[in-house]
Amino acid sequence: MVHDGVPIPSAIVLSHHEQWARLRAAAPEAADVAHVIGDPCYDRLRASATWRLRYRRALGADDGETVLAISSTWREESLLGEVSELYERLLAELPVDEFRLVAILHPHIWYQHGPDAVHRWLAPHERSGLLVVPPERGWRAALVAADQLIGDHGSVTAYGAAIGLPTSLAAFPESRVAAGSAVAVLGSLAPRLDLAQPLLPQLQKAAAEHTPAKAAAVHEMITSCPDEAADRLRALCYSMLELDEPRTEPGVPPDTTAGLPDAPWPWRPTAMYVTGSVHSGRSVALDRYPAEMLRPEQIPSRSHLVVAADHPGRRMRAVADIAVLTDATAWGRHARTWLSDALSAQPGLQLAAAVDGGTCTVRTRSGEQVRLSGTGEPALHASAVFEWLAAGRDLADLSPGLTVNGHLVSVDLH
């Protein structure tokens, strides 16, 4: 920044007075041209807060579901570098229908290895319900939608903590963090995740012990000028150009939903072990687990296997109890033919199901067919029918007042 005692840049912009003090100590001449203008990225994050419900809807998260963001910076000491098995652990241990998991990876990871390599590494995890947001867009929306955050010493983790997310650290190399910075403050406040212990109780504890004061402490170190960066930066630029500023205010719009799913199925594992029970003849309770993330000893007893028709694993498709056509809308009237063909092609298949919007049509090996619809996840309805039949009940006795995981379901036998 300085050559022969003269600053090279005409202006240096900083987000916080703490940074200016560090610059003054390291390079006094550079500090003479420094300006504290705030953090435009953080301001954009705050401006997006009013879109939280829109982002959650894009993620398929209902009010009772927890969106968990997992952020990793780059290099070996990062979350991805130190504890890459964390994604598998979270998917295996957190209930599918209670959590939505979003991975936010530093752009350097994408550009060093290439998008194809990243998606290839994480393909089983993505099939099991992990959303990996692209590097260009989507990460701020994911943070705003989130209820909780796991991260490391990267800036995204600090941003999430600053906007109030209960934050746990899966990796945090103290030597890589500048003393007195926002990330250092975060490191002094956030609990460390212990991978030798079950993860869900630790997340529950972090949420229960979170206080607004923790978020405020990180927020105060992120920016000295909250919500003012666009104004200050534009004023500085026009002053250097010796031009008058436009009369209109600079735009700081909320993020769009770009980078988030544009269809609901990416959030549902394409292969799931499901356990269930029928209560009082009117209610079915189901629990689902991503099949690819479970070790053999973790597979629940008395479970059935549900596999999407486009799941790439040949062996898993071959041993499925239920096959699900997830995009029946695109098939039109041919979806009905697919139901029959799937049962004919796979002798071990017990049910075939086709999801069309919020409706799930289920066909048995005997040719009986039922259509179920409601506000819950439609693929659950196929498992509800499986458990109903496994309990020794007849398809014709499916109650019109049936509930599946607490959601009322309409039943149409045809």
Image (cartoon, rainbow, N blue to C red):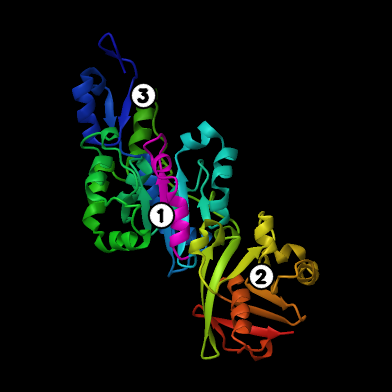
- Relative height, residue 402 to residue 196 (above, below): below
Q: Real-space Cα distance between discs 3 and 2?
A: 66 Å
Q: Residue 326's spot in the image, x, y percent? A: 67, 64
Q: Which residue, given by chain and number where applicable, does mark 2 sit on?
A: 322
Q: Is 340 included in the stretch rendered in magenta?
A: no
- Classify mark 1: helix, strand or loop: helix
Q: Nearer the viewer, mark 3 or mark 2?
A: 2
Tell me, yes or no, if residue 386 can be seen here: yes
Q: Provide the residue span drawn in magenta.
A: 69-95
* Image label count: 3
Q: Which residue, given by chain and number where applicable, does mark 3 sit on?
A: 240
Q: Residue 39's spot in the image, x, y percent? A: 34, 39
Q: Real-space Cα distance between discs 1 and 2?
A: 36 Å
- Residue at 43% across / 42% down in the picture? 80
Rate crowding at label 1 as few (under 14), some (14 to 19) or many (20 or more) other CA atoms within 10 Å. Answer: many
| 399 to the left or right of 42 | right
N-terminal of the pair, mark 1 or mark 2, is 1
- Please tell me in which quadrant of the rendered image residue 18 appears: top left
Q: Amino acid at mark 3?
A: Met
- Classify mark 2: helix, strand or loop: strand
- Relative height, residue 51 to residue 186 (above, below): below
| 222 to the left or right of 300 | left
- Residue at 19% across / 29% down in the picture? 21
Q: Which residue, given by chain and number where applicable, does mark 1 sit on?
A: 144
Q: Is 90 included in the stretch rendered in magenta?
A: yes
Q: Nearer the viewer, mark 1 or mark 2?
A: 2
- Residue at 51% across / 58% down in the picture? 295
- Classify mark 3: helix, strand or loop: helix
Q: The C terminus is located in which quarter?
A: bottom right
Q: Amino acid at mark 2?
A: Ile
Q: Amino acid at mark 1?
A: Val
